[in-house]
Image (cartoon, coloured by chain):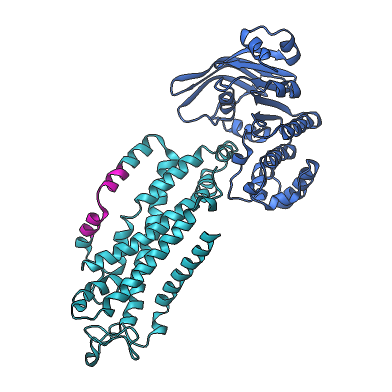
């Protein structure tokens, strides 16, 4: 699905990610794990064209044979818009605090599918109900909702769009353990029901075990190891992976 | 809760002052420049509620009409400084980088010059009436607004919802208006209120120095200017009432701004 090769990211001439290569297999959940500063979030930023100013990227990230890192390409922008959905760490910051949820969810989901407002309303209400959310939240402002509800509203958008690829950048680190669990179940459901490929970024090894089949270990801006979660857990090759596994309770 | 009551009180006071000046011609039976030499320096009483001045003009009429001049100068100049400030600060904050550095150094250079000096220079060149006063105060009053807008834009530019909007290809004008400007409103509103109080004060000071609006147009500042001599002969009412109006107006605006500045009222800490 997504083939990343020779990815190098520099910000202000300082290397953040060096010569990283890994692949995200189609229809599976892949985790990138690494400590803070290992370059995992920057990798995502590069894929989504939201690098900070002064950021430079080279290498390739092929999605359906097209290079995601070719920012100038118009078709690529359209592809990114129609095929990829993103969930960020802090849902409270992912919504504009002064606009009602209704219009924000429409911007995030309805407009991308070219649905009219009324189509969007009926469809979104069904999705929200399926996810155990009340449809009344559409009339509320983001600051009136809890972090968990906002994060679930985000995933509701993913259920609405049914993207080919979902990128989730530490989506569970700002919510409590019980909500984390629910959230992960929802991600799995999305993966099973619609075959959405999911790239999951986290620093929590337990979450990796819970959610994914494939994993990529990043350390100091480099991919040190990648492969099936089971294999890596049984036979870690790299010293960092070993340390990581030993640090589990 | 206490701050809410105070807010309502000060808003009501400001509203009363504004209404009094707007409906001046219905409240007072005399003309603004209607002189009556038989009734000069009359103390506050039955015919003239707030007395008359050295030309026998009704002080209350001039007080209310004067408020019109002072407040309209303040409103127009604040709107002007708001527009300039938002555009300047917005460009600086949104583009960032080198443009931001150059624009901010220029702004700091302007801030370093006391605005009264710039206003005096402009006034010397234009020697104008109400509108040119508003213009002069407007183009010297936008500096703080620009700084606030810039800092808000820099804060919001990094916010995830702005990043997401960019990623989804939302048009730039929409990002600027809906995401950034909209969320800057609370901060901009408060600074604009303080600017408003500053503009009232600036008009009053200039007119008091005799370089404000022309003598034919009453304003609170020019009334104070002419009252200087009258106070000496014991005609206190000519100076005290404009003074009280200025005092009440500036106090009300400042307290409203202070109440809105209260962080509990702000819901945007994104």
**Chain A rendering hue:** blue
Q: Who's cyan, chain-wise?
A: B
Residue A126: x and y, percent? 79, 45
Residue A180: x and y, percent? 72, 32
Q: Is residue B4 visible?
A: yes
- x 70%, y 50%: residue: A138
- x 59%, y 20%: residue: A35
- x 46%, y 55%: residue: B189
Q: Is residue A99 left or right of residue B251?
A: right
Q: Does B117 appear above or below A49?
A: below
Magenta includes A84?
Answer: no
Q: Main secondary structure of the magenta part?
A: helix
Q: Does A138 appear above or below A130?
A: below
Chain part drawn in magenta = B106-122
Residue A31 location, quadrant? top right
Q: Does B70 appear above or below B110?
A: below
Q: Is residue B132 visible?
A: no
Residue A160 location, quadrant? top right
Residue B34: x and y, percent? 28, 86
**Residue closer to the observer: A74 or B173:** B173
Quadrant that contains the N terminus of chain B: bottom right
Residue B119 location, quadrant? bottom left
- x 77%, y 49%: residue: A122
Magenta includes B109?
Answer: yes
**Residue closer to the observer: B237 or B63:** B237
Q: Is residue B43 left or right of residue A124?
A: left
Residue that extends furthest to the front in the rendered view of this protein: B2
Q: Does B266 appear above or below B64?
A: above
């Amino acid at each position: 699905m997504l083939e990343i090769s020779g990815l190098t990211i520099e910000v202000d001439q300082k290397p953040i990610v060096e010569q990283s290569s890994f692949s995200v297999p189609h229809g599976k959940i892949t985790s990138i794990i690494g400590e803070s500063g290992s370059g995992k979030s920057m990798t995502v930023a590069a894929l989504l064209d939201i690098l900070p100013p002064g950021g430079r990227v080279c290498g390739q990230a092929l999605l359906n044979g097209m290079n995601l890192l070719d920012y100038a390409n118009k078709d690529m922008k359209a592809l990114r818009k129609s095929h990829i959905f993103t969930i960020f760490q802090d849902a409270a910051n992912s919504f504009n605090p002064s606009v009602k949820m209704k219009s924000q969810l429409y911007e995030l989901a309805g407009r991308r599918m070219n649905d009219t407002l009324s189509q969007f309303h009926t469809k979104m209400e069904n999705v929200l109900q399926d996810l155990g959310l009340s449809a009344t939240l559409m009339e509320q402002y983001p600051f009136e909702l809890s972090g968990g509800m906002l994060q679930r509203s985000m995933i509701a958008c993913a259920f609405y769009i049914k993207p080919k690829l979902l990128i989730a950048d530490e989506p569970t680190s700002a919510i409590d353990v019980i909500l984390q669990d629910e959230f992960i179940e929802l991600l799995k459901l999305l993966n099973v029901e619609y075959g959405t490929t999911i790239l999951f970024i986290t620093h929590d090894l337990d979450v990796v075990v819970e959610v994914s089949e494939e994993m990529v270990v990043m350390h100091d801006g480099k991919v040190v190891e990648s492969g099936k979660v089971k294999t890596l857990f049984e036979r870690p090759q790299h010293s960092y992976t070993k340390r990581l596994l030993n640090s589990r309770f | 809760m206490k701050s809410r009551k105070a807010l309502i009180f000060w808003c009501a006071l400001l509203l009363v002052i504004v209404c009094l000046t707007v409906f001046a011609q219905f409240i007072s039976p005399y003309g603004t420049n209607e002189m009556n030499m038989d009734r000069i320096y009359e103390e506050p009483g039955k015919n003239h509620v707030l007395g008359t001045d050295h030309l026998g003009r009704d002080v209350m009429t001039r007080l209310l009409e004067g408020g019109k001049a002072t407040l309209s100068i303040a409103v127009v100049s604040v709107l002007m400084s708001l527009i300039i400030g938002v555009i300047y600060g917005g460009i600086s904050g949104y583009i960032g980088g080198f443009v931001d550095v150059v624009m901010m150094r220029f702004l700091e250079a302007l801030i370093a010059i006391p605005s009264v000096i710039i206003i005096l220079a402009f006034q010397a060149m234009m020697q104008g009436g109400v509108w040119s006063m508003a213009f002069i105060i407007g183009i010297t009053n936008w500096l703080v607004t620009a700084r606030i807008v810039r800092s808000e834009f820099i804060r919001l530019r990094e916010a995830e919802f702005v990043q997401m909007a960019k990623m989804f290809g939302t048009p730039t004008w929409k990002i600027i208006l809906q995401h950034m400007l909209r969320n800057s409103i609370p901060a901009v509103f408060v600074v604009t209120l303080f600017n408003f109080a500053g503009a009232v004060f600036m008009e009053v000071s200039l007119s008091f120095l005799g370089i404000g609006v022309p003598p034919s147009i009453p304003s609170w500042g020019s009334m104070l200017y002419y009252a200087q001599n009258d106070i000496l002969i014991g005609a206190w009412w000519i100076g005290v009432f404009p003074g009280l109006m200025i005092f009440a107006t500036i106090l009300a605006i400042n307290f409203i701004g202070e109440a809105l500045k209260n962080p509990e009222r702000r819901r945007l800490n994104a």
